[in-house]
Image: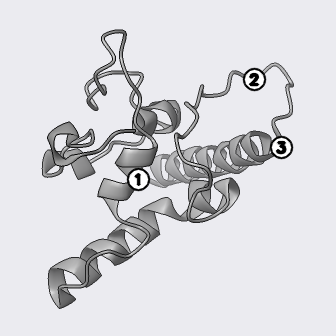
Amino acid sequence: MSLYRTDYLLSALLLVCTAGQCGMALADTNTDVGIPMPSIPLAQGENCVEDSGFMRRNHMDLLKHQRDETMLEGVRGKPYSLKDCLACHVVRGPDAVPVTVSSPQHFCRSCHDYAAVSIDCFQCHASRPDMAAGATR
């Protein structure tokens, strides 16, 4: 790789990291400075398992840790399960049916699309609660 290309990639990475930190700070403080921010649907529950800022920064690590405990140790029912997240953060379409991840209105997509981060959870997992299993939210 040429020196020019390496410098360009490092500059681009620095810009992305800096922009990500600024965007996170703005999202935490809800400061309106003319920068378009993602429209995040409200959750259906009373309280999240952690505060919003913590979840924005750490949800991926919590889900990976929960995945590892479930798959390797058989531990289920912890507060960071994807199933519980989806039950609380369900977004319903005009027909009152929960939308799937293919819809731009899906809770996860609101931030992931904004940050240009792909979501790979739903390659294996359902992207909406199982309404037949009694999820009423």
Q: Which mark is residue 85?
A: 1
How far, Cα to Cα, is label 2 from label 1?
28 Å
Mark on residue 19? none
Mark 1 vs 3, N-terminal side: 3
Figure quadrant of the C terminus? top left
Look at discs 2 and 1 and give the one toward the viewer.
1
Which of the two marks, 1 or 3, is nearer to us in this view?
1
Per the rendering, the mark at residue 35 is 2
Q: Report which residue position mark 3 lands on.
A: 29
Determine the secondary structure under disc 2.
Answer: loop
Can you say whether 32 is above or below 85 in the image?
Answer: above
Real-space Cα distance between discs 2 and 3?
A: 13 Å
| Foreground tag (2 vs 3) | 3
Query: What's the residue type where badge 1 is placed?
Result: Cys
**Mark with earlier residue (2, 3):** 3
* Residue at the limit of the structure toward the bottom, as seen here: 73
- Residue depicted at x 83% and y 43%: 29
Question: For mark 2, does the 10 Å Cα neighbourhood hold few (<14), some (14 to 19), or many (20 or more) residues?
Answer: few
Q: Residue at x 18, y 44 (%)?
A: 126
Counting residues from the start of the chain, the first of labels 2 and 1 encountered is 2
Residue 106, picture quadrant = top left
Q: Amino acid at mark 3?
A: Thr
Is 25 left or right of 82, judged from the image as shown? right
Disc 1 from disc 3: Cα separation: 23 Å
Q: Which amino acid is tagged 2?
A: Ile
Q: Quadrant of residue 94?
A: top left
Residue nearest the observer in this picture, 12 or 32: 32
